[in-house]
Image (tube, rainbow, N blue to C red):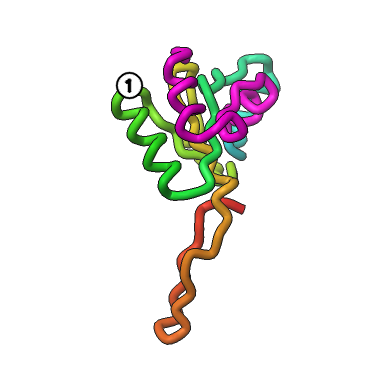
Amino acid sequence: MEPQIIEALRKQLGNSSVHTSDKLLDERRFDYSVPSHLRDWRGDPLERPGVVVRPTTPSEVQAIVRIASETQTPLVPFGLGSGVCGGIKPDPSEILVDLSEMNRIREIDEVNLLATFDAGK
């Protein structure tokens, strides 16, 4: 991952939302997909994302998308990792957008029985 991309993300989101630690990058290599875990268990691990960002607001997501667009950097969305289809296969050139910190109730419409929630836990 280009250092200037990480710095641009930190400038927009703050240091606490931009992660480059080996532990977190390893944890976000795959979802609950069994083939991904078997591959890892056999010693052929998937690559890690270049950076993990944890936005907390829609405006932060917009900032991430804007930076990715300006730098032509691919994005990988990561909800809670509960997918079983192997959709999470990042590589070091990608920004993984971990939505787990987006955990607010946005709206409850009691008349129409509709609710709008963030994607996180």
Q: Position of residue 89 (x, y in %)?
A: 49, 28
Q: Main secondary structure of the magenta part?
A: helix
**Residue 71 shown in magenta:** no
- At x 43% / y 24%, what residue is drawn? 8
- At x 58% / y 55%, what residue is drawn? 103
Work out whether 85 lies above or below 22: below
- At x 61% / y 39%, what residue is drawn? 32
Residue under pointer 1 = 71
Q: Position of residue 80 (x, y in %)?
A: 58, 46
Amino acid under disc 1? Thr
Q: Position of residue 88 (x, y in %)?
A: 50, 33
31 vs 120, nearest the viewer = 120
The local crowd at label 1, few if under 14, some if 14 to 19, many if 20 or more residues have their Cα within 10 Å, is few
- State which region is magenta: 1-30
**Residue 8 shown in magenta:** yes
Q: Residue furthest bottom?
A: 111
- At x 29% / y 25%, what residue is drawn? 70
